[in-house]
Image (spheres, rainbow, N blue to C red):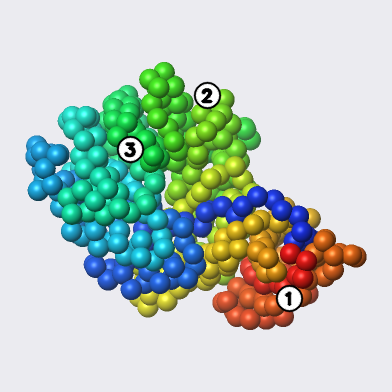
Amino acid sequence: MNLSTDTVKITVDFSRKEGKIKPVHGVGQPPFYGTDFDMFHYLEEAGIPFSRLHDVGGFLGGGRYVDVPNLFRDFDADPFDPASYDFVFTDLLITALVESGVEPFFRLGVSIENECMKKAYRLDPPKDNLKWAQICEGIIRHYTQGWADGFAYDIRYWEIWNEPDNYEEVPENQMWRGTKEQFYALYGVASRYLKERFPHLKIGGYGSCGFYAARGRKEAVAEAASSPRMEYFLTFFEGFLAYVKENDCPLDFFSWHSYDGVQANLFYAEYARRRLDEEGFVHTEHTLNEWNCEVGMRGTSRHAAVTAAMLLGLQDSSLDSAMFYDARYGVSVYGGLFHPLTAEPFPAYYSFLGFGQLYRLGQQVAAASDREDVYVVAAREKGEGYVMIANLSGEDIRLKAVLEDGKNAGHKICRIRECRVIDRTRTWEKCALPDVLAKDMVLCVGVECGGI
């Protein structure tokens, strides 16, 4: 061990409330194969709040799940006739999620077509925007109002499309074979139509590719962050805000994506919040509903640490929610939570399990690290407290942890009930609170405090 001479001080005061723990530990594709949903117990155990249903339509889904063309196979059919819809497989998926305590975050649109330059199948703008909206109405009614032998599930978020800004050049765009103006028109028609019929639900979009270029401009660096493609993401975003504002379109939430690091994503979150507020969308939620860091490191303690740090950092951002891309059980490098051959959890899964303990307690309390590269969040409920720490400093550093209950005279030190660790040799093992916070270490500490 190459121990740094530095010390990180972690201070927690369980008597000082600081808002609620937010649902930033959602996931994208849930882990299933065919119609086998047995792995959903992992989602339930980690208290996963959302599963965003994008990119579940093809591959192992076999063209049967979620996507609008899978649910409504003949666009010329009658959208008000239940016989026009094929809900069978998506019913199974939605029901399995709900029974596991996971709320579906329903993306209305299509899965990515990575080989679209050879041939695109479902990426063209709908030939009738109103009819597309009526089809979406049937889907929402089926899952929330029992229509067509459906359900009365509490599915609040309905997201119009995904990454229509992927490329400005139409032949290269793997998500939208149209112009930005065509997408704005689709969003305008669909959002107004759906909000009128479902005023109690949240209608939004559009799964932006992100704000990389905004950070590039800030840092004045000539790199990929300020490439023409990344600049187009911003151009699309600004045009979208202008269109929605001018045409008085509903925007209950705005969704965006990033595959950057923790500090970069915190910058993007504040950028998105600031631009929404500046344009008058102060009540619009925003969600980072597709993120992952250092995807090539999946299955390692490093990936667990950067994942934990992201969850902790996002908790203290302006975001309302976030979803990791993704929790699939499969061969994709983005499937960062489960081994594609054994189905066993990767170390990063336990970062979600740890954050789930914070979310279960619900009440965030004051917690601070005196190093920017060591992240900490703490929560409490009655006499139970929980602290989660992630070390991204790149070195082994001495740890000084002060866990206090300020309600008691002399700031009584809380008793540690359990400590679990993720590091280079251990995954979710019980341990004593260490004196050294090792490189890429995650600690999850349960405590008892008499005064809370």
211 or 75, nearer to the observer: 75
Please name whichever residue, 372 or 32, is drawn nearer the observer in this view of the structure: 32
Mark 2, mark 1: which one is toward the viewer? 1
Residue 227 x/y as whole percent: 48, 34
Q: Residue drawn 46% across and 41% down? A: 256
**Helix, strand or loop status at disc 3:** loop
Residue 110 percent coordinates (x, y)? 26, 45
Provide the residue designation for mark 2: 279
Q: Residue furthest top?
A: 246
Q: Residue 21, can we see it?
A: yes
Q: Position of residue 220 (x, y in %)?
A: 62, 32
Which three-letter amino acid code belongs to the residue tagged 1?
A: Ile
What type is the residue that disc 3 sits on?
A: Phe
Q: Circle 1 is placed at which residue position?
A: 416
Q: Position of residue 234 (x, y in %)?
A: 47, 30
Q: Is residue 63 visible?
A: no
Q: Residue at x 72, y 73 (%)?
A: 448
Which secondary structure, mark 1? Answer: strand
**Comparing marks 1 and 3, which lies closer to the viewer?**
3
Q: Are marks 2 and 1 in contact (CB under 8 Å)?
A: no
Q: Residue at x 15, y 52 (%)?
A: 86
Pick the front one: 207 or 229: 207
Measure the C-alpha gap from mark 2 to mark 3.
25 Å
Three-letter code, disc 2: Glu
Tell me the residue that label 3 is attached to: 198
